[in-house]
Structure formats: C-alpha cells, structure tokens
Image: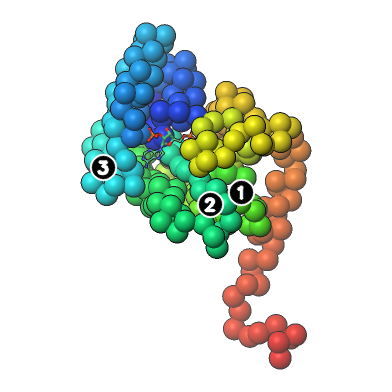
Amino acid sequence: MSQQLALITGASSGIGATYAKQLAARGTNLILVARDEARLNLLAQSLREAHSVEVSVLAADLTNHDDLLRVDREIQQNKAITLLVNNAGMTVEGEFIDGDIAKIQTMLTLNIVALTQLAHSAAQAFRARRNGTIVNIASVLALVSESANGAYNASKAYVLSLTRNLHRELAESGVRMQAVLPGLTRTEIFERAGKSINDLPAEMLMEVDDLVSAALRGLDAGELVTIPSVEDVQLWQNYEDARIAILPFISLNKPATRYL
Ligand SMILES: NC(=O)c1ccc[n+]([C@@H]2O[C@H](COP(=O)([O-])OP(=O)(O)OC[C@H]3O[C@@H](n4cnc5c(N)ncnc54)[C@H](OP(=O)(O)O)[C@@H]3O)[C@@H](O)[C@H]2O)c1
C-alpha cells in the first residue's frame, strides 16, 4: 500500500491528538493543525520518535479567514494527502437564549464554516486523484435537538447531513466518507467551555482512546456513519429507514387532506 498522509485539524488535544497517535502507530504520516503550535510540536516530536513517521505542524486558527485559507491551500496543493480528519470543534455551555451570541457565532464558524471549506477542497482534490478519505467528526447530538444550547447540536446535524451528501456525490469516485458521532468523551472540550468533566455521568463518558480506535475500526469496516457506543447496529438502521421512508412524501403538489 502507498504511504498515507493524514491532515488532522484540532490535533493538539483530545480526539484529534488521539487520531494522530493511533494513525502514527499505523505508519501514517501526519500534518497536525491547531492553534497551539508549541503543543503540536511536542506531539509531533514524540510521534516521530515513537513511530518513525513524518509529522509536520501547521499552526492555524480556523476561525481566522487567512489561517483557514492557508490550511485550505495545503489540502489543495499537497498531493500526498490521502486522509482529512475534520475534527477541530468547540462547544458553548449553557442554554441558547441566555448564551453568549459572539461565542456561539465563533463556534459555528469553527464547527461549520471551517469544516465545510476544508471538506470542499479535500473532496475536489481527492476526487481528481480518485483516492482519499474524509472523516468528519460530528456528535451524537446531531440526533438530539432538545439539549445543550441547540446551536452546537445543529452544527453537528449539519456535519452529518453534509457527510451524507458528500457520500452521494462521491459515489463511484474512489473517495470514502465517514461521519463519526461520539457521545460524551473524556477530552478538554468541557473544561474549555467552563464545565467540569466530573459533573458528567460516568456511565456515559467514553475514554478517548476507545472512541478513536472504534472510529478507525468503523472506517476500516467501510461505515459511512460510526456511533461507537451503539451495540445494536439495527437500531441505527431503523432510524435511517424511518428517515428515508418519508422522503417520497415531503414535497408534493397538493397539501395533505388534513389541511384541506
Ligand atoms: N469530547 C466529547 O464529548 C465530544 C463529543 C462529540 C463530539 N465531539 C467533537 O470532537 C471534536 C474534537 O473535540 P475534543 O472533544 O477532542 O475537544 P478538545 O480536546 O477541546 O480538542 C479540540 C481541538 O480543536 C482545536 N481547536 C479549537 N479551536 C480551534 C480553532 N479556532 N482553530 C483551530 N483549532 C482549534 C484545539 O486546539 P487549539 O486550542 O490548540 O487550537 C484542539 O486541538 C470536536 O469537533 C467536538 O465537537 C466531542
């Protein structure tokens, strides 16, 4: 197999850093993206030493337009990249109405705008080469509207929806898509949003190594959507079947009889 090169956003901590470690252990070369350059350099050095892989660092604030375009150019121009892990994301604690709208907008810029830009460029570049994989990190909150502040949930529903459509557009192109829907996972995301991880129910909290290794196994198995803790995969199939069953009826030229 030819040498793989993965670009991982949000690689300085949590799920992204764990992807970096597990992919390096598989022999994948890496480009690590996040804001904290010193932290990325430390991780890069340890991965080079442990796994003899090539690791480069691209420090960027993906909510900054110029920084985003720098990362975007790397995806467009570096033809060795075979995997994009679109992982960088944040949440904002609290309910929507009393939440800080500036923080919510920053969150949407990171979780939606940046992810979209990078997915777009990777899809074009990979399709042209008929090879490559895009992993978008969503959340189980993509399936839950009535919790958190709603805007985070909606940003993750967007990621799931975009991934499904990219899968459709890239069928027959040789390019793979995967949406990963983590449940609560032990990372820094809660502390960054001002919430203590100790307040979360232990039975719902997955260790980040388990989460990423399940996500990679889901990718190996060819899954489009991976929800690591769902034991009975038929439950997900039923959910998808119900979603698809209504599609022939949601846009017709007459209102339903109950509205006449
Ligand atoms: N942990 C969970 O329970 C959970 C559940 C479902 C989904 N997720 C999703 O998983 C993804 C990773 O989150 P995590 O849990 O691993 O959280 P995390 O430990 O806080 O990691 C977030 C990563 O994103 C980077 N980042 C944050 N803001 C950025 C910006 N403006 N520009 C570039 N990079 C930025 C951070 O690095 P810097 O600070 O160095 O920039 C860090 O590397 C997110 O998309 C999150 O929504 C997490």
Quadrant in the picture for the N terminus = top left
Expressed as whole percent of the image width and height from the top left, the position of residue 250 reads 63, 72
Task: Tell me the amino acid under the disc marked 3.
Answer: Asp
Residue 63's mark? Answer: none
Which disc, if any, is residue 67? 3
Q: Quadrant of residue 12?
A: top left
Q: Residues within 10 Å of mark 3 (few under 14, many from 20)?
A: some
Judge: label 3 CB < 8 Å from ligand 1: yes
Of mark 1 and mark 2, the one earlier in the sequence is 1
Give the amino acid type for the residue marked by disc 2 in the picture. Tyr
Q: Which residue is mark 1?
A: 141
- Is residue 220 among the parts visible in the rendering? no
**Label whose residue precedes the other's in the sequence (1 or 3):** 3
Q: Confirm whether residue 37 shows in the render.
A: yes
Circle 3: element type: helix
Horizontal and vertical percent for residue 249?
A: 66, 72
Instruction: Name the residue rendered at 31%, 23% in the picture.
Output: 38
| Labels 1, 2: front one | 2
Mark 3–mark 2 Cα distance, whole angstroms, equals 23 Å
